[in-house]
Amino acid sequence: MNEIRILLSAEGVVEFVKLATECDFDIDVHCKRLHVDGKSILGMMSIDLNHILTVRYYGHSLKFEELLARYAVA
């Protein structure tokens, strides 16, 4: 399992879900008490994007990890 903290914009959510659906592994996104499937556009749009998100993913994809690196927070 890999874990990274990111901050997304509304436009970033669309790109995130697009790349997540291309992955053949599970992607979970956590924000406070809310946990959603990272491949679900409705789930991702229901998250409060003003908060830092924790992404847990269970595989590797170079394109997806590059996207995560762009939105990563310290």
Image (spheres, grey):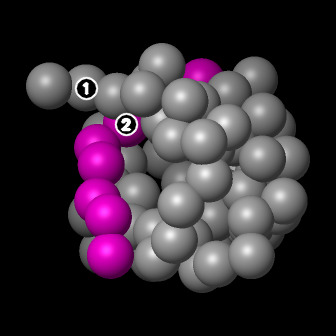
Question: Residue at position x 82%, y 62% from top?
Answer: 21
Residue neighbourhood size for the residue with mark 1, other residues' Cα within 10 Å, grouped as few (<14), some (14–19), many (≥20): few
Q: Is residue 8 magenta?
A: yes
Identified by mark 1, the residue type is: Val
Disc 2: which residue: 6
> Which region is colored magenta?
1-10
Image coordinates of residue 61 in percent, x first then y, are 62, 53
Q: Is residue 70 left or right of residue 44?
A: left
Residue 59 appears in the picture as rendered: yes
Image coordinates of residue 65 in percent, x first then y, are 52, 41
Image coordinates of residue 34 in percent, x first then y, are 41, 73
Q: For the residues labelled 2 and 1, say whether their Cβ atoms are less than 8 Å apart.
A: yes
Q: Is residue 67 left or right of residue 73?
A: right
Please name whichever residue, 55 or 30, is drawn nearer the observer in this view of the structure. 55
Question: Residue at position x 74%, y 76% from top?
Answer: 24
Identified by mark 2, the residue type is: Ile
Q: Is residue 20 left or right of residue 74?
A: right
Q: Secondary structure at mark 2?
A: strand
Q: Secondary structure at mark 1?
A: loop
When the figure is inspected, residue 70 is found, relative to residue 7, above or below; the finding is above
Disc 1: which residue: 73
Residue 50 appears in the picture as rendered: no
